[in-house]
Amino acid sequence: MSRIRVLVGTRKGAFILRSDAGRKKWEIDGPHFVGWEVYHMKGSPIDPDRLYASQSSAWFGQIIQRSNNGGRNWEQPGTPPGEPLTTPEGFPKGESNKFVYDASSATGKPLTTHQWYDGTQRPWEFKRVWHLEPSLTDPDTVYAGVEDAALFRTVDGGKTWQELAGLRGHGTGPKWQPGAGGMCLHTILFDPGNPRRIYTAISAAGAFRTDDAGLTWKPINRGLKSEYIPDPEAEVGHCVHRIAMHPARTNVLYMQKHWEVLRSDNAGDQWQNISGNLPSDFGFLVEVHAHEPETIYVVPIKSDFAHHPPEAKLRVYRSRTGGNEWEALTNGLPQEHCYVNVLRDAMAVDSLDECGVYFGTTGGQVYCSPDGGDHWTPIVRDLPSVVSVEVQTLR
Amino acid sequence: MIHVRLPYHLQTLARISADIDLEVAGPVSPNTILNALEERFPMLRGTIRDHITKERRPLIRFFACAEDYSHLPPDTPLPEAIRSGAETFIILGAIAGG
C-alpha cells in the first residue's frame, strides 16, 4: 500500500503531513524547529526516510538538520572526521552549518563581488540555504543552493559542505544581482540519464547548465527578455523564479520567470514564451505532472508589486499542451477575497497512478488535489506562511 | 563559574532549558565566554558569531550588568559580578520587526 508524505517548510517551523494513498485523511506532525524559518526539506530518492532540512534565522544563521526515520527525529549531522560523534556531555557536534565560499586558487577564478541593488559591487556573503537537492544515487550526497547565490555539495550526509566554485567562477558573477528576495540559487535539477548534467537557476542571474558534473557552467538564457535590465536580452541578469523538468524528458525545461512562462526543447539553449492565455504571466512556480510531460502547472500572481492572485481568485492554471493553452483549476480554491501568494518552491506532485498535486500558500494553507488538479481540498488551513512543499510517494 | 543565558532558539538547538554554568579559562570577556560555550556546545558554532571571522552576527546582542557589550571589542573584560557568577551574561536576539 502506497503512502504519501508531504514536507512543508514555513516561516516558523516545519510540518510533515502523512496520508495513505487515498489522500483524504492526514496526520499533521509538527512544528519541528519551532520559531525557525525552514526554507526547504527534501528526502533522498533512494532512501526516502533520509530527510534533509534547511533551518535558518536572520538572528542565528544556518542550521542543517537530517532525519533517518522520515522526520520523526532530527539531528545536526556535522562531526569533524575522526572525532567522536558527541561531546563528553553527550551532545551532537556540528560543523554542518559551515558554508564557506571557495576562494582557493585551485578552483581557478574565485569571484569576490556581485552587483548590489544600487549597481555597486558587493562581496559575496552567505545568508542561508534556499534549496536542498539530494542525489539520485547516494543518500549521503546532497546539493545546496544558497544565498548569496552559489552551489554547495556534501558527500558525507551533511556533515561538511564544499562549494562547486565553477558556477560563480565562470565569469558573469559581477553582473548577478539580488531580486527582492535576495540573490539566491533556488533550483537544482538533475538529469537522470546523464549524471554529468545539472541545471540550476538563480534570482536574479538566470539559468545555468553544467555538462561536466559541476566543474564548468554556461548560462542558458537565450530567448529570455527582461525589461528591468539595461539589455533586455542580456546573457545574464534575468530574474528566473523556477525551472522544472519531467525526469523522462530531460531536454524539455519549463520556466516561470519574474514575468513570462517559457519552455525550452533543447536543454535550455533557446527559450520561447508559452504564457498564452494566462491572466498574468507573473508568478513564482512551475511544476510538471508526474506521468504527462506536456502537462504543466503554474499559479499566476497579479504582479511583482501586488503579490496576490489576479482578481483575488486563487487559481492554478494547467496546460496539457506544454504551454500556450491554459485552463483555470478552481474547484475547492477560494474565488473571492484571496490575497495569498504561492512561492517558488511551494508546489510538488506525487507519483501515484492518479497524480496528486500539492501547494502551500503564504496564508498557511496546504492544498491537495488527488486528481491532477481537478478538485482541491485544504489539508491544513492555518500554518505559518508556507515557503516550500515537497512530496514523497512511499511504496 | 560564569552564568550564561541563551535565547530560546539557541536553547532548543543546544537541547537545554535553563541558564548554563561555564568554566572560563583566563580573562573573562565575550570572546572567552563564547569560546567556552562553543567548546561545550559545538552545535552553536556559527549561530552567535561567524565561523571564520568570529565576528558577532548582526542581530545578536551581549548584555552584562545592565550594560550593552555588543559593540565593544570582543576581548573587553567583563565586570567582577560576571566573573564571580553573581550576575548572568546574557546573549539575546535583537528586537527586529513589529
Image (cartoon, grey):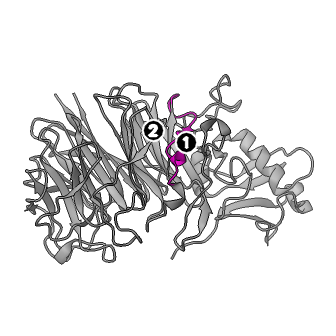
- Check if mark 1 and mark 2 are on a common chain: yes
Nearest the eye: B31 or A197: A197
For mark 2, does the 10 Å Cα neighbourhood hold few (<14), some (14 to 19), or many (20 or more) residues? Answer: many
Q: Quadrant of residue A248?
A: top left
Percent x, y for residue A214? 46, 36
Residue under the point 30% across and 65% down: A225
Residue under the point 32% across and 29% down: A194
Badge 2 amino acid: Tyr
Residue A391 in the figure: left or right of residue A88: left
Mark 1 or mark 2, earlier in chain: 2
- What secondary structure is found at the residue carrying circle 1? loop
- Residue sitting farthest toward the top: A82
- Residue on which disc 2 sits: A143
Magenta stretch bounds: A155-172
Question: Is residue A66 rendered magenta in the image?
Answer: no
Q: Nearer the viewer, mark 1 or mark 2?
A: 1
**Main SS class of the magenta portion in the image:** loop
Residue under the point 18% across and 67% down: A314
Distance from Cα at disc 1 to Cα at disc 2? 13 Å
- What secondary structure is found at the residue carrying circle 2? strand
Residue B98 in the figure: left or right of residue A135: right
Chain to which the residue tagged by mark 1 belongs? A
> The C terminus of chain A appears in which quarter of the rendering?
top left
- Residue on which disc 1 sits: A165
Badge 1 amino acid: Ala
Percent x, y for residue A199? 36, 42
